[in-house]
Amino acid sequence: MNLVYLIIIFVLSIFLGYELITKIPPLLHTPLMSGTNAISGITIIGALIATGSGNSRLCMVLGAVALFFATINVVGGFVVTHRMLEKFKKKEKK
């Protein structure tokens, strides 16, 4: 793919992400973050493929870095989702 197309897609994704976050009420930010965990799962698969391809040392390093940060995003998303779901549980009366 041409570099110009990649830059256009990157700029459009930044614009779309900004508009999406600013238009959604703060109450829905946590469920939206849970949805991004699925996207980070796709990132993990791509990073594993890039790391294991063995094309070049740079590709392996970038894949490992992407794998590290995507894993942090997934784990953090699950922690926040768990915390959110705890708020909906009924509390026992004393």
Image: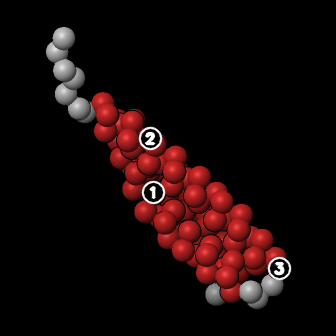
Of circles 1 and 2, the one toward us is 2
Q: In the rendered view, does 32 fall on the left or right side of 19? A: left
Pick out the residue farthest to the top: 94
* Crowding near the residue tagged with mark 1, few <14, some 14–19, many ≥20 C-alpha atoms within 10 Å: some
Disc on the earlier residue, 1 or 3: 1
User: Distance between the Cα atoms at labels 1 and 2?
Assistant: 12 Å
Q: Residues within 10 Å of mark 2 (few under 14, many from 20)?
A: some
Q: Nearer the viewer, residue 59 or 93?
A: 93
User: Residue beneath label 2, please?
Assistant: 80
Mark 1 → mark 3, Cα distance in angstroms: 29 Å
User: Which residue is at a point 39% across and 44% down the rendered structure image?
Assistant: 81
Which amino acid is tagged 1?
Answer: Thr
Q: Amino acid at mark 3?
A: Arg
Residue bearing the label numbered 3: 57
The correct choice, above or below, for 72 with respect to 39 in the image is above
As measured in the structure, the alpha-carbon distance from the residue carrying label 3 to the one carrying label 2 is 35 Å
Element carrying mark 3: helix
From the viewer's side, name the closer residue of 20 and 39.
39
Relative height, residue 91 to residue 79 (above, below):
above
Q: Is residue 5 visible?
A: no
Eyeballing the image, is 7 above or below 69? below
Horizontal and vertical percent position of residue 7: 66, 72
Residue 6 place in picture, x, y as percent: 64, 76
Residue located 64% across and 87% down the image: 1
